[in-house]
Image (cartoon, grey):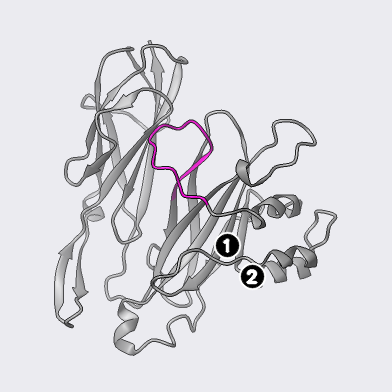
Amino acid sequence: MPIFALLTPMLGCTTTELSESWRIDRLRVLGVAAEPAEPRPGDRVTFTSLVVSPDVAVASTVWFACLVGGDDFGCSIDESLLDTLDPSGELSPDDLEALYAAGFIGAEPYLPPVWNVPLDALDALAPEDRLEGLTAIVNVTAIPEPSSEGEELDESDLELAYKRVPVSEAVSPNRNPIIAAIALDGVEIPEGTVASIDRGQPYTITVALSDESVETYPFVNKEGVEETRTEEPYLTWYAEAGEFDQTNDLWPYFEAIYYPPDDAAPDAKVWVVVRDRRGGMAWTALALRYR
């Protein structure tokens, strides 16, 4: 399994913040979703990611996971781990065992990311604190294909993102939102369809969530009193070209005005990512053809 070369620059990279820019002009990790969104100890969690780039292919996404306290950020990856791996580029069973012990959970497309939440993850907490639980951090590193044969990648070529995953024994654990539809000027665009639009003319893009995506759930506040809360999902818009009147929308006003570019390539994409403030996430894309 030839992922050793992918791990080498990833383990040595420095932490950089995810850009807040809506324009997709470089390799970006726009979203990471866990399923289930709020696992319990012993659950098997699978992950998907939204990795986009305007001009380079993605060779792999490498995943690590760890349990941390509420204020910690990121997993600490021991670079000396490289010394234990087979330098031929193939991973032996012993290599994989060492990687998994260090928090490695996958390297797409070779190993889909899967994390088995430790059965004892919440054992250190008092019974009443297990309802809120702890936070797991997932490190996701997107690695591009080299632009030429023999080119060596360095940390500036990579894109690093983090995903916080709550692990709890909540009575009503969070679920990922579901995007039911995306529409252009009121016309629903089926998934996989390319929508033709005119340059220089504004268009209204709207997003609809499934009814169950806006959850009502019990919450115990700091005084120990149970409250009923309703989620407030929000959207973030991204595009390869053109502009938006705003790049964030708060439920229930899920729409943005999109202004196509006057001069650009004939095709481009728009992405929208929805987050529910409890770690849930979903996304969809709209393919556009400019006339």
In the rendered structure, does residue 266 fall within the stretch colored magenta? Answer: no
Q: Are marks 2 and 1 in contact (CB under 8 Å)?
A: yes
Three-letter amino acid code at the position of disc 2: Ala
The quadrant of the image that shows the N terminus is bottom right
Give the mark nearer the N terminus: 2 vs 1: 1
For residue 102, which numbered disc appears in the image? 2
Please provide the residue range marked out in magenta: 16-31
The quadrant of the image that shows the C terminus is top left
Residue closer to the observer: 106 or 35? 106
For residue 64, which numbered disc appears in the image? 1
Residue ID at (48%, 77%): 42
Element on which disc 2 rests: loop
Whole-percent x, y for residue 28 in the image: 50, 41
Rendered position, 248 above or below 44: above
Rendered position, 263 above or below 60: above
Residue closer to the observer: 250 or 20? 20
Rendered position, 259 above or below 139: above
Three-letter amino acid code at the position of disc 1: Phe
Quadrant for residue 271, please give it: top left
**Left/right of residue 94 with respect to residue 228 in the rendered view:** right
Q: CA distance from mark 2 to mark 1?
A: 8 Å
**Left/right of residue 75 with respect to residue 96 in the rendered view:** left
